[in-house]
């Protein structure tokens, strides 16, 4: 029988085959849902890097004098009763400003004026500007910034120094002063600046005759990362770099990071804090849930003990046996993700296996067991969720899609100070044999973002 034709029983003319029933494509997620916001972000162009040479200068220490002169427009005004802050003025917009922390106290006084610096990790200042330059008044030492303008990074890397046509100069270590960011020409720009210092930024200034208005980015997605020390330290363009860099590559502009070295899903006996239930991932979960993220990524387990008894630094028993340790880990992982899903039903839950700075062939059974517990827990949850398999490569999501194992992300047994020539540890693992270098953070951010992009698009 020829395909596509049916022959009548009595012979004669052929009739076209009935077309197979059509299956309508799945409806797109609502634009105002967590998944809808993430999908929209994935369709936007990736961040580029501007070749224009940014100039960054710092003004006199312990001063509120602006480079724009006495007629500079400062928001909020320096001489105000403390009611107006970067957390509520209309000239800037920020994600979840009602939860921003305002720092006060003796360290926030400059030239006799009481300042109101803010903690902006995860809370970039977003605004539209028609000036050639703007300034940030930083309180405390060591001003830092990531500056993104019209979808492009504006500096060769994370800004921690003055810049003269893009060339790095002195470290921005001076306390309590304006730092000026000069684009070289006047134009209308959309600006996102993520600013940090010892105490935080407290005001913006622009030249007289220019305007600055808040840029509302509330329709764009937010993310939180729960991690151990792998969530700390600089990458190329970001403080707490690995997850910031990955979020930026995915088009996610709002990110909070809860990273605490030495911690895990369950208690760890390294010191009093890691042994304290409040410092475990589970103990920190409620604070993270309150941020209502669209995507919640957890990357940890390296520090968790599942195969031996343990005590804390005071000799108190944490786990009496290896069986107790494994069960404690299982219970912590299960409770953690179950509570997360119940509290955030629409959030995309993402998890990785534990980081593995030294490669074992085959994968170390303890590391694999930890990853297996995480995956099995996710498989018992309602979607949407994604498991990223950094130990073996590949991923799987709640829609049943997956990518094949492509090999471990971290390879070899060397470090930057003791290279072995057997893997990428020679480039990406620091002298201590555990933590990532700046290049390592950037590399694994790119790997994480690429895998996560594919997995999200397949949901």
Image (cartoon, rainbow, N blue to C red):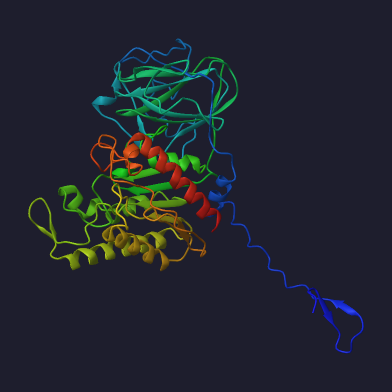
User: Can residue 255 be seen by looking at this rendering?
Assistant: no
In the image, what residue occupies the spot 56% across and 52% down? 36
User: Residue 107, relative to residue 450: is it above or below?
Assistant: above
130 sits to left or right of 182 = right
User: Residue 218, relative to residue 210: is it above or below?
Assistant: below
Residue 288 location, x and y as percent? 36, 50
In the image, what residue occupies the spot 31% across and 32% down? 103
Q: Residue furthest top?
A: 69
Residue 352 location, x and y as percent? 38, 54
User: Can residue 293 be seen by looking at this rendering?
Assistant: yes
Viewer-nearest residue: 5 or 69: 5
Q: Residue furthest left?
A: 315
In the image, what residue occupies the spot 77% across and 72% down? 19
191 sits to left or right of 316 = right
User: Residue 312, relative to residue 5: is it above or below?
Assistant: above
Viewer-nearest residue: 100 or 39: 39
Q: How many marks?
A: 0
Viewer-nearest residue: 456 or 295: 456
Residue 119 location, x and y as percent? 35, 34
In the image, what residue occupies the spot 78% across and 74% down? 3
If the image is split into quadrants, where does the C terminus sit?
Answer: bottom right
408 sits to left or right of 42 = left
Q: Residue furthest bottom?
A: 10
User: Residue 173, relative to residue 47: is it above or below?
Assistant: above
Q: Quadrant of residue 18?
A: bottom right
247 sits to left or right of 64 = right
Residue 239 location, x and y as percent? 36, 34
If the image is split into quadrants, where does the N terminus sit?
Answer: bottom right
Viewer-nearest residue: 153 or 335: 153
Q: Quadrant of residue 9?
A: bottom right
């Amino acid at each position: 029988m020829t395909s596509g034709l049916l022959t009548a029983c009595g012979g004669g003319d052929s009739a076209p085959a009935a077309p197979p029933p059509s299956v309508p494509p799945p409806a797109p997620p609502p634009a105002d849902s967590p998944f809808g916001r993430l999908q929209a972000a994935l369709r936007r162009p990736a961040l580029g890097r501007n070749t224009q040479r940014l100039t960054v200068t710092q003004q006199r220490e312990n001063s509120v004098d602006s480079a724009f002169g006495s007629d500079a427009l400062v928001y909020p005004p320096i001489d105000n009763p403390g009611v107006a802050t970067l957390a509520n003025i209309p000239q800037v917009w920020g994600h979840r400003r009602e939860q921003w922390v305002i720092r006060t106290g003796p360290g926030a006084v400059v030239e006799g004026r009481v300042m109101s610096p803010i903690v902006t990790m995860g809370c970039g200042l977003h605004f539209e500007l028609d000036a050639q330059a703007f300034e940030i008044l930083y309180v405390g030492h060591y001003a830092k910034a990531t500056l993104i303008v019209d979808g492009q990074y504006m500096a060769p890397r994370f800004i921690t120094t003055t810049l003269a046509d893009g060339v790095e100069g002195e470290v921005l270590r001076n306390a309590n002063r304006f730092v000026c960011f000069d684009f070289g020409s006047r134009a209308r720009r959309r600006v996102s600046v993520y600013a940090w210092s010892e105490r935080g930024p407290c005001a913006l200034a622009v030249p007289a005759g220019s305007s600055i208005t808040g840029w509302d980015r509330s329709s764009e997605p937010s993310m939180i990362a729960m991690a151990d020390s792998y969530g700390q330290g600089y990458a190329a363009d970001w403080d707490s770099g690995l997850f910031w860099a990955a979020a930026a590559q995915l088009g996610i502009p709002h990110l909070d990071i809860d990273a605490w070295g030495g911690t895990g899903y369950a208690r760890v006996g390294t010191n009093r804090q890691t042994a304290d239930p409040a410092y475990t991932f589970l103990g920190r979960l409620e604070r993270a849930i309150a941020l209502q993220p669209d995507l919640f990524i957890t990357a940890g387990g390296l520090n968790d003990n599942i195969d031996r008894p343990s005590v804390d630094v005071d000799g108190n028993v944490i786990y009496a046996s290896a069986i107790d340790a494994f069960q404690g880990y299982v219970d912590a992982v299960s409770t953690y993700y179950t509570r997360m899903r119940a509290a955030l039903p629409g959030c995309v839950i993402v998890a990785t296996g534990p980081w593995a700075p030294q490669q074992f062939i085959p994968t170390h059974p303890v590391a694999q067991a930890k990853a297996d517990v995480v995956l099995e827990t996710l498989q018992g949850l309602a979607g949407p969720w994604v498991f990223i398999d950094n130990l073996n490569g590949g991923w799987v999501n709640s829609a049943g899609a997956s990518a094949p194992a492509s090999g471990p992300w971290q390879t070899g047994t060397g470090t930057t100070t003791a290279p072995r020539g057997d893997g990428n540890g020679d480039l990406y693992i620091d002298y201590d044999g555990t933590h990532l270098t700046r290049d390592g953070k950037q590399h694994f951010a790119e790997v994480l973002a690429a895998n996560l992009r594919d997995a999200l698009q397949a949901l």
